[in-house]
Image (spheres, coloured by chain):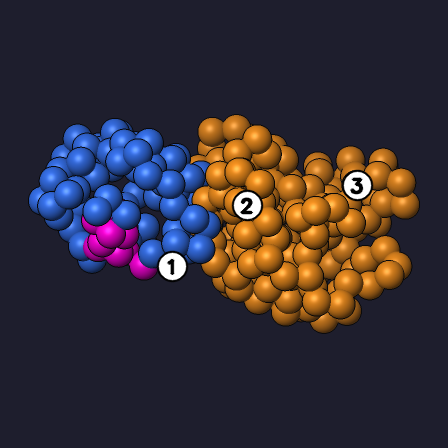
Chain colours: A orange, B blue
Amino acid sequence: MNRFGLDFHHLGLAVAQPDRTVELLTRLGYEIGSAVFDPAQMVRLAMCWHPQMPAVEIITPSDAASPIDRLLRRNGPTIYHVCYRTRCITTAIVALERDGFNVIAVSEPKPAVLFGGHNVAFYSVDGLGLIELLQDPNPPTAEPQEPSDATDRDL
Amino acid sequence: MQQTEIYDKLTNIFRDTFDDPDLVIGPQLTADDVDGWDSLYHIRLMLSVQEAFKIKFSALEIGQLKNVGDLANLIELRST
C-alpha cells in the first residue's frame, strides 16, 4: 500500500464493439467475465482477468447516450482510465490533494453493478489523467474474482 | 467579483470549450443541457474555469456542483 491508499485494480478499455477485443484478450490468456449493464453509467461492462497481466474492464456503449460516445468517435478503441481500489475514496482524494495534485471530480461515488454494489467514482488527476476509484472497505486478500451477481452475459 | 462578471467570463469559457459561439448559460444549466458535455469535456471545462479565475477547487467542491449556478456561487465565494 502507498501513501494514498490506492491499489491498482484494472485498466478501463472503451470499445464500440467488444467482439474483436474479447477475441484478442482471450487469445492473450484472459478469462472474460460476464457482461453487465450499468444503468448509472449507461454502458456495458465486463471484467477480464489474467494470471500475469493487468486486469482489463471492457466498456461498451449501450443503445442510449453514454459517457464514452465522444471518446470512441474521436479515438476509437482506447484505454482511457486506470482504476484503483481504496478503502475510502474521500481519504484517498484528500491525500492526493494534500500532496499537491490537482484533482477534478468527474462523477460522484455511485454503486457499481460490476463490483457488487461497491461505490465507484471518477476523477481527473494531473499527471495521471482519468482514474476510477473503487471503494472497498474490506479488500479481499486474494486476487479479485468475477462477481457472481452478473445479470447480462451479452456485451 | 460580481455574479454578472462571473457569468460573462463563464459564458466565454463555455463557448470556447464546447465550440459553440451561441451557447447561453444560466444558473439552472447542467451537463444534460449541453451537447458534448461528457466526462472528458467536464475535466477540460473545470481546468479552464480554474485557470481563468485563478482559483483552485477541491475535488469535493467540484463534486458537489449541481448546475452552473452552483459553480458561479462557488467562484464568487472563492474570489472574495
Callout 1 crowding tier (Cα within 10 Å): few <14, some 14–19, many ≥20:
few
Image location (x, y in percent) of residue B31 = 32, 50
Are labels 2 and 3 on one chain?
yes
Residue at 70 percent across and 37 percent down: it is: A20
Distance from the alpha carbon under mark 2 to that under mark 3: 28 Å
Residue closest to the eye, B63 or A17:
B63
Query: Residue beneath label 1, please?
Result: B64
Residue at 64 percent across and 66 percent down: it is: A118
Q: Quadrant of residue A30?
A: top right
Magenta residues span B66-77
Q: Secondary structure at mark 3?
A: loop
Mark 3 is on which residue type?
Pro
Query: Residue beneath label 3, please?
Result: A54
Callout 3 crowding tier (Cα within 10 Å): few <14, some 14–19, many ≥20:
some
Mark 2 is on which residue type?
Arg
Query: Residue beneath label 2, please?
Result: A98
Residue at 70 percent across and 47 percent down: it is: A3
Distance from the alpha carbon under mark 3 to that under mark 1: 33 Å
Image location (x, y in percent) of residue B45 = 34, 38
Q: In screen coordinates, is A139 left or right of A110?
A: right
Residue at 33 percent across and 39 percent down: it is: B55
Mark 1 is on which residue type?
Gln
Residue B73 sits inside the magenta stretch: yes
